[in-house]
Image (spheres, rainbow, N blue to C red):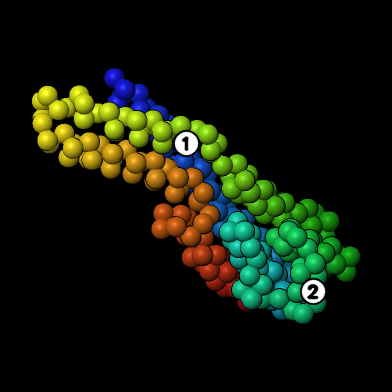
Amino acid sequence: LIGFVISLLLVFRTNTGYDRWWEGRKQWGMLVNNSRNLAVKLASLIDSKENKVYFSRMISNFVFAIKEHLRDGVAFEKLNLTKEELIILGSKKHVPSGIVSLLYDKVNELKTAGEISQEEFITLDTNLNALLDILGACERIKNTPIPYSYSLFIKKFIFIYVTTVPLAFIPSFGYFSALIATFIFYVLVSMEVLAEEIEDPFGTDDNDLPTEQLSIKISENIREILN
């Protein structure tokens, strides 16, 4: 009976971790789509090669910045920035938002210069807002971990269960009870460790999301579209 109860707890724990992992994957899928949509719109709306190169750099910079931001740091050496942009972003605590702000400044500059209309500006605004929405959703996942007390309770429950289960098995299995208890401990603890590993999907563990590869793929797609 106790084994059934602990199994339900572990299933709930694993499903909660997987939901966070899958939600993170959906947000990065939306990041891929919105980055491409924004690049395609810009490629058709602007003619200047210089401006296309600028947007290509900055959209790619945003993707790499959000990846590093979700890993608790920003590696400026991975970003393709001018000295002026580096000074501006170096003074900001939230680099991804700073990059979107620079993108907005450039789009406003194009609108003021008459290169894009108000309606076209509104169309681009939708995708730029979506980038910030995706960033916020990823931050929500990262900054709202599973309560520590819940995880600690399950660990205590597993320990007590495994240390007492041989008492029920000894009359039937004798010394083999130790092997059975060890196997049960391995299964239960593995489920708990797996749930802990995937509940923060933006790290560098083996089972985390491949954000590095996704960032490189997005950057390649953006350069192909705009250049």
Residue placed most toward the observer, 202 or 59: 202
Give the spatial CA distance, label 2 vs label 1.
44 Å
**Crowd tier of the residue under label 2, counting other residues whose Cα lies within 10 Å: few below 14, some 14–19, many 20 or above:** few
On the question of residue 156 being in view, the answer is yes
Residue drawn at x 32%, y 38% as measured from the top left: 188
Determine if residue 114 is in view: no
**Residue 77, horizontal then vertical, whole percent:** 64, 76
Q: Position of residue 102 (x, y in %)?
A: 78, 65
- Please identify the quarter of the rendering in which residue 39 is found: bottom right
Q: Which residue lies under the disc numbered 2?
A: 87
Residue type for callout 1: Leu
Q: Position of residue 179 (x, y in %)?
A: 17, 40
Q: Is residue 49 above or below residue 145?
A: below
- Sequence-first tag of 2 and 1: 2
User: Depth-wise, is mark 2 or mark 1 nearer the camera?
Assistant: 1
Horizontal arrangement in the rendering, residue 2 relative to residue 23 (left or right): left
Label 2 residue SS: helix
Q: In the rendering, at what x and y percent does residue 144 appear?
A: 60, 41
**What's the residue at 18%, 37% (across, down)?**
178
* Residue 152 disc label: 1
> In which quadrant of the rendered view does residue 89 lie?
bottom right
Residue ranking furthest to the right: 112
- Rendered-image quadrant of the C terminus: bottom right
The amino acid at mark 2 is Ile
Residue drawn at x 41%, y 54% as measured from the top left: 207
